[in-house]
């Protein structure tokens, strides 16, 4: 039976954080992936995948509500050995160089319940290429790379591709506690929006799917409390 939980992190609280931020552009020294890099990586990932088989993508974050490409259905799935975590420091998109944010990825340990999305065999390579261009942008310091995993979906196992964090990346921040993560997400904003907004959307989508991620649920409570407290301090008139 589904449990109707009331989130602490509401659109009203998220709106207090939002502000218009111009795109700050790539960080100094950023080397982007080129078309030939994407083609080479696509070949590498799909080299053992039968051309006439559908391709499955494990979607655990924004891909659940905003797929980059057309999908041909999805099923619930469980991935063991990995968990969601805001563990990549970002100075763009949902943060700035002056006020960096955190991006969610999959990190080692635990388990993750989400969905697997099906890409039809006829167009799987092209659609995967679209997804790759969204998820992987840096050539020299990749932080989020595709890998093959085995997920449990229903009563069967499926091979699927997932994007997971590269722990050797200089932007990896896997040692942040929930409280430290909340402090970042409660204030970081970029031209794509705020970290608080991303967290709210992720938790809401998971709950709609019947998935209760205890760490993210606690995180949204902590972020909501920080935003509310900060707003009260800011709006209190000086004596």
Image (cartoon, rainbow, N blue to C red):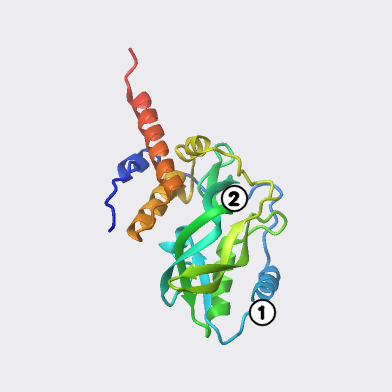
Q: Quadrant of residue 82?
A: bottom right
Measured in 3D between alpha carbons, the distance from the residue under mark 2 to the one under mark 1, in whole angstroms, is 36 Å
Marks 2, 1: nearer the viewer? 1
Residue 197 x %, y %: 41, 47
Q: On residue 233, which mark appears?
A: none
Q: Secondary structure at mark 1?
A: loop
Q: Residues within 10 Å of mark 1 (few under 14, many from 20)?
A: few
Residue 165 x %, y %: 61, 54
In depth, the one of 88 and 234 nearer the eye is 88
Position above or below: 112 against 157 = above
Q: Secondary structure at mark 2?
A: loop
Q: On residue 48, which mark appears?
A: 1
Q: According to the image, label 2 marks what residue? A: 25
Residue occupying image coordinates x 33% and y 58%:
208
Residue occupying image coordinates x 70% and y 54%:
141
Residue 75 x %, y %: 42, 71
Residue occupying image coordinates x 41% and y 33%:
226
Residue 85 x %, y %: 53, 49
Q: Quadrant of residue 71?
A: bottom left
Mark before the other along the chain sequence, 2 or 1: 2
- Whether residue 27 is visible here, answered yes or no, is yes
- Whether residue 20 is visible here, answered yes or no, is no
């Amino acid at each position: 039976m589904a449990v109707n939980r009331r989130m602490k992190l509401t659109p009203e609280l998220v709106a207090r954080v939002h502000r218009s931020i111009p795109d700050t552009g790539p960080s100094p020294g950023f080397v982007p992936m080129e078309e030939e890099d994407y083609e080479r990586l696509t070949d590498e990932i799909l080299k053992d995948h039968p051309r006439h088989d559908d391709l499955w993508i494990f979607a655990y974050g924004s891909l659940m509500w905003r797929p980059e490409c057309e999908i041909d259905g999805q099923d619930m799935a469980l991935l063991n050995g990995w968990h969601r975590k805001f563990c990549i420091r970002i100075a763009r998109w949902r943060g700035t160089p002056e006020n960096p944010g955190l991006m969610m990825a999959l990190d080692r340990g635990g388990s993750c319940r989400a969905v697997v999305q099906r890409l039809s065999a006829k167009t799987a390579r092209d659609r995967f290429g679209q997804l790759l261009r969204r998820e992987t942008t840096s050539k020299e310091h990749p932080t989020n790379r595709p890998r093959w995993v085995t997920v449990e979906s229903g009563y069967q196992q499926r091979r699927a591709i997932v994007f997971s964090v590269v722990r050797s990346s200089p932007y990896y921040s896997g040692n942040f506690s929930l409280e430290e993560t909340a402090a970042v997400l409660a204030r970081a904003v970029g031209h794509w929006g705020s970290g608080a907004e991303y967290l709210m959307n992720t938790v809401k989508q998971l709950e709609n799917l019947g998935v209760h991620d205890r760490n993210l649920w606690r995180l949204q409570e902590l972020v909501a409390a920080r935003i509310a407290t900060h707003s009260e301090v800011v709006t209190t008139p000086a004596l």
